Amino acid sequence: MRILVTGANGQVGHELLRALAEKSSASRQIIPATRDGALEDGTPCGCIDLADIDGLPKALARIAPNLIINAAAYTAVDRAEDEPELATRINADAVGALGAWAAAHAARVVHYSTDYVFDGTAARPYLEDDPTHPLGVYGRSKLAGECALRESGARHLILRTAWVYGARGHNFLRTMLRLAAEHDELRIVDDQIGAPTSAGLIAGVTASVVARWCDPTAESGGRTLDGAYHVVAAGQTSWWGFARAIFARLAHVGIIERVPRLHAIRTGEYPTRAKRPAYSVLDTSRLREAFGIDLPDWQAALDSVVDELVRLLNPARPSGA
């Protein structure tokens, strides 16, 4: 099996390469691809640019994957309000093109989506089949990508996640680390609720799900595992609660010497170009029932990410020290 991982330099893509390698075998070939054809360390890899839709069929034919894991996306939520055509091209039109190629070549597609397909007005965790109602361009483009993949006729999994962060890349954890060095006090939104989910957790779940999904014995009697699943850590918190947990752990392991004073504020006190869902908790029961996967609490996953951050910032120092 030839497994193509698009967006291999992104948060999830980077972790996917590691997670898939841990489950690799002689019959599997993992092929990373990035927009410019090079990994972060300069190693050449496949070249897949989702903005170049006309070039996708030729690029895919050159790689000839049996499975496409699409970890590439337009994720600039606020900028998308000013670049709707580009966001839609990458998050929707290109996903449809991936699906069309896969359907024509008996390949499968794993695609990541987002809590932003919902409007955040629910009073309980969102189920996969709950009505969608995105609030902005980014959410609409991701929802359109889901629809395009379903309509392509390809065998597919859509994995919705939320509040993604990691030791690498641009995310809330890295932003808090930077701001701690610049400010004595921080104002953090406390009325948006979700489940912080590490890129490593998403990648690990994906590797396990793919192994089961692609096993010919996993589906019987006409039953298919195709469809949408929610992949988020258990539990919930606010951005303020997440920040407080981050700083407590960063101080404990000695990454920061001083914890900024945190002030909880409401969304209206921190205006952004795009409107965010106020409630982004996703129900993961379907994932557990179909694949037997129980997801850890978000705080336990945060401990693992902070350990990795220690290794990145202080390679000679043991994690947890």
Image (cartoon, helix red, strand yellow):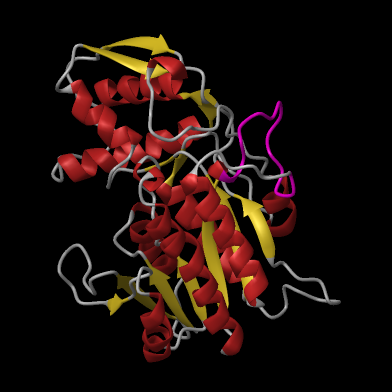
Q: Position of residue 189 (x, y in %)?
A: 42, 19
Q: Quadrant of residue 146?
A: bottom right
Q: Is residue 98 left or right of residue 130?
A: left
Residue 3, compared with residue 128, is above or below; it is below
Q: For the point 30% across and 43% down, which residue is it?
A: 167
Q: Provide the residue span drawn in magenta.
A: 117-130
Nearest the eye: 209 or 149? 149
Q: Position of residue 100 (x, y in %)?
A: 56, 80
Q: Quadrant of residue 285?
A: top right
Q: For the point 24% across and 15% down, which residue is it?
A: 259
Residue 6, compared with residue 301, is above or below; it is below
Nearest the eye: 10 or 28? 10
The image quadrant where one finds the C terminus is: top left
Q: Is residue 182 left or right of residue 137?
A: left
Residue 195 visible to the viewer: yes
Q: Position of residue 304 (x, y in %)?
A: 38, 40
Please tell me how many numbered marks the rendered image carries. Answer: 0
Q: For the point 54% across and 50% down, which residue is it?
A: 140
Q: Residue furthest right?
A: 221
Residue 129 sits inside the magenta stretch = yes
Q: Quadrant of residue 318?
A: top left
Q: Position of residue 97 (x, y in %)?
A: 50, 76
**Main secondary structure along the magenta-highlighted residues:** loop
Residue 168 sits inside the magenta stretch = no
